Amino acid sequence: HGHCRVPETFKDDPSLGLWVKGQRAQCKRQQARTDGPIPICWQKRISQLEEIGFEWQVARGPNKINESDWNERIQQLCQFKKEHGHCRVPETFKDDPSLGLWVKGQRAQCKRQQARTDGPIPICWQKRISQLEEIGFEWQVGKDSQANENNWNERFHQLCQFKMEHGHCRVPERFKDDPSFGMWVISQRAGYKKQQAMPGGPKPFWKKRISQLEEIGFEWQVARGPNKINESDWNERIQQLCQFKKEHGHCQVPFHFKDDPSFGAWVHKTRSEYKKQQKRDGGATPLWKERIRELEEIGFEWELGKESKANKSDWNKRFQQLCRFKEEHGHCRVPKKFKEDPSFGRWVLRQRAESKRLQAIDGGPDPFWKKRITQLEEIGFDWNPRARTTAKNNH
């Protein structure tokens, strides 16, 4: 059928139609909860349904328009534009008065969708809005021909202000200060996705918008669904991890951590997400690059147990880089904030931290770490450069 709009009285299986109706009703109740967040089980269900294009709002009543009628109107509008050079069909269009009324209705319906406060714009309407915009449909007509562009610029300045206050452009979908602002941000991501898929790439005015958004650090991909974690939750978990390391000397939180099982699960999920990010085309997203940096600075390990081939290869490359550094500078004391390669300075710092941790545990370092320690010591690696500096100053 190409969609998930199962009729309430579905002849082949009436119970399926009733079940679909029940999912919409249950989602509405969950969204309206005031006694706490949506339960995990329902977050998962909502995510599963949305992944297959399930629509939470469907057209009802006299204004309902099905897919075939919609496509016919789109074809009519394309023909009108071909003949007149624009999509501004008069309300009293002599050749077909119903087309003029339909066009007026689309502007009114879009305005209502943008003003929604009970949830995101339904996927079917996001798709229709995108279809209309692709053929050059104007949402604002009349005296102010620049209204649509002006509105976009106002929203863009609002986004710049948001970033100044919050340090990022991840406006919540349900932004309390201005719900329509959150929906506008979602529409930019949806529009970007559509434009990227178009033959020949984005249209000129969209290229300009994309450039403006990227210049202020706008992210086209953001976390969604039950595994989503916002900035405040992330910072709390980082603090929790720092405290764990202070107490235990490492960041290897057990999956079944008795003191807080959800913490162990979070650490496990973070490693899984890291692997996914490394496999992405173009590498990790800017958000995850920052998170990976945060974790590595406190000595977080991405691989546990036996050493992986990838980890071994990366370590060997860094070791060769350290050998070259010594040849050039005569020592292995790479600054923490090494200008030529900041990640190299952090890697050297991690070697000292990991060696210290392993020396303190029963049985000492693992065999592969013993080998690493030996390699580092053979080139004169300094495990405690601060102590050396202090002693030198005393003399």
Image (spheres, rainbow, N blue to C red):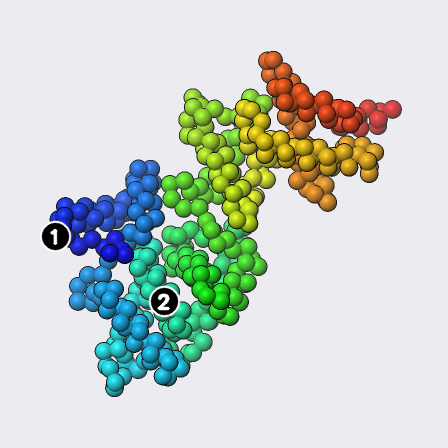
Give residue 76's quadrant in the image: bottom left
Identify the residue under disc 1.
Answer: 11
Q: Is residue 118 above or below residue 374?
A: below
Q: How many marks?
A: 2
What's the residue type where badge 1 is placed? Lys
Q: Which mark is residue 104?
A: none
Locate the N terminus by quadrant.
bottom left
Secondary element at image label 1: loop
For image coordinates 52% across by 55% down, the residue present is: 218
Of pointers 2 and 1, the one earlier in the residue sequence: 1
Residue 22 lies, in percent from the top left, at: 19, 46
Question: Does any portion of residue 395 appear in the rendered image?
Answer: yes
Q: Is residue 31 above or below residue 112?
A: above
Give residue 131's quadrant in the image: bottom left
Locate the C terminus by quadrant.
top right
Question: Does any portion of residue 384 appear in the rendered image?
Answer: no
Q: CA distance from mark 2 to mark 1?
A: 32 Å
Residue 219 lies, in percent from the top left, at: 50, 53
Left or right for 52, reference 21: right
Comparing labels 2 and 1, the label whose residue is closer to the camera = 1
For image coordinates 61% across by 19% down, the residue present is: 366
Secondary element at image label 2: helix
Residue 359 lies, in percent from the top left, at: 65, 18
Give residue 381's quadrant in the image: top right
Crowding near the residue tagged with mark 2, few <14, some 14–19, many ≥20 C-alpha atoms within 10 Å: some
Q: Which mark is residue 131?
A: 2
For image coordinates 17% across by 50% down, the residue present is: 17
Whether residues under marks 2 and 1 lie with C-beta atoms below 8 angstroms apart, the answer is no
For image coordinates 65% across by 32% down, the residue present is: 315
